[in-house]
Image: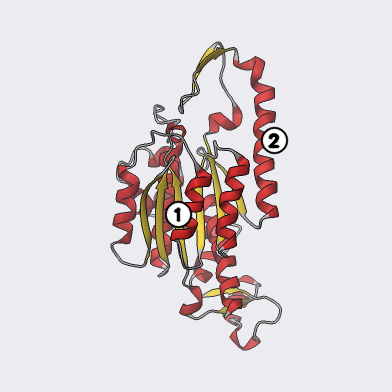
Amino acid sequence: MVGKTELQKYLDPKVLNRIRKLDVKARLVVEGFISGLHRSPFQGFSVEFAQHREYSPGDDLKHLDWKVQARTDRFYIKQYEVETNLRSTFLVDISESMRYGDKREDGMSKYHYAACLAASMAFLLLQQQDAVGLATFDDDLRSYLAPSTSPNQIKRFVHELDISIPKQKTDLEHICHNLAEKIARRGMVCLISDLLVDVDGLMRGLQHFRHHDHEVLLLHVMDADELTFPFQGNTQFRGLEDTGRLTIEPRVLRQGYLEAVERFTSDVKRRCIAHQIDYRLISTADHLDAAILAFLSARTAAVRKASARR
């Protein structure tokens, strides 16, 4: 039997990069994630995820779970299964810029990280009887799976991610407008992208989902190189989306580059907050548990809102 320590190591992208099959990666990530939750700041989150939610003022006290309160010193309400189901659609960027990092032996490309993250969350949600859907896109919608709870959905989900080859530019505004009309029933939309796009267009597209009353989570995946700019000596940079080549001395530009990245991510986060969109910046060097917890936290908030509408 695989122990907890062995499972938890699969949260490391460097370890996952040595495993070829995405469905195996997803299963190992989820098992490692669940086995490691006792050391998480979200203690007990996995246990309550499918059957409980945190108490809010005004909730009926007869549904309080006192056993959980004694264990965690926090108040949780028992939820019925009908209240815990949600339809989640993952939008995964397969534009060419997502290929960055695929030549390194010690890490994953942005796309492989995003695919593993999406597959892991889909695997977990399907176990909780949530409906899960997928859309892959670059400058056009390349594949679409409507949300489903079918046992075969994870196979279809992983297959679409496996066969996708990042190779075009990104047009997120167009994609969001298109999908907002396809996803008829209210639920959660999780966009996973490196966001090399026009921010104004991005926000217009995401607002379309909010207009249809979807909960929106934006997982901004960047390579560790993009966040730290570690390059030394004369380096040739080649754009992955027809942006040309440039040979420079990186140390001359490092400070200005890092400041520009900080301005960009802060601007996106500020706009997301203004439109009630949950934004998380993720490095491909990060273990996957933080991103999964961010998604589950947003998912729980969405379920709570849906329950309040009933």
User: The residue under label 2 is which amino acid type?
Assistant: Arg
Q: Secondary structure at mark 2?
A: helix
> Could you tell me if residue 287 is visible in this image?
no
User: In which quadrant of the rendered view does residue 111 lie?
Assistant: top left
Placement of 125 over or under 76, stated as above or below: above
Mark 2 = which residue?
263
Relative image position of residue 106 (x, y in whole percent): 42, 31
Quadrant for the N terminus in the image: bottom left
Placement of 59 over or under 72, stated as above or below: below
Quadrant for the C terminus in the image: bottom right
- Left or right relative to 15: residue 176: right
The residue at the point 43 percent across, 63 percent down is 125
Relative image position of residue 263 (x, y in whole percent): 69, 35
Measured Cα–Cα span from mark 2 to mark 1 = 27 Å
Q: Nearer the viewer, residue 77 or 252?
A: 252
The residue at the point 41 percent across, 34 percent down is 168
Q: Nearer the viewer, residue 297 or 33?
A: 297
Mark 1 = which residue?
90
The residue at the point 55 percent across, 37 percent down is 197
Placement of 164 over or under 147, stated as above or below: above
Few, some or many residues within 10 Å of mark 2 (<14, 14–19, 20+) = few
Q: Secondary structure at mark 1?
A: strand
User: The residue under label 1 is which amino acid type?
Assistant: Phe
Relative image position of residue 117 (x, y in whole percent): 45, 49
Few, some or many residues within 10 Å of mark 1 (<14, 14–19, 20+) = many
- Left or right relative to 230: residue 4: left
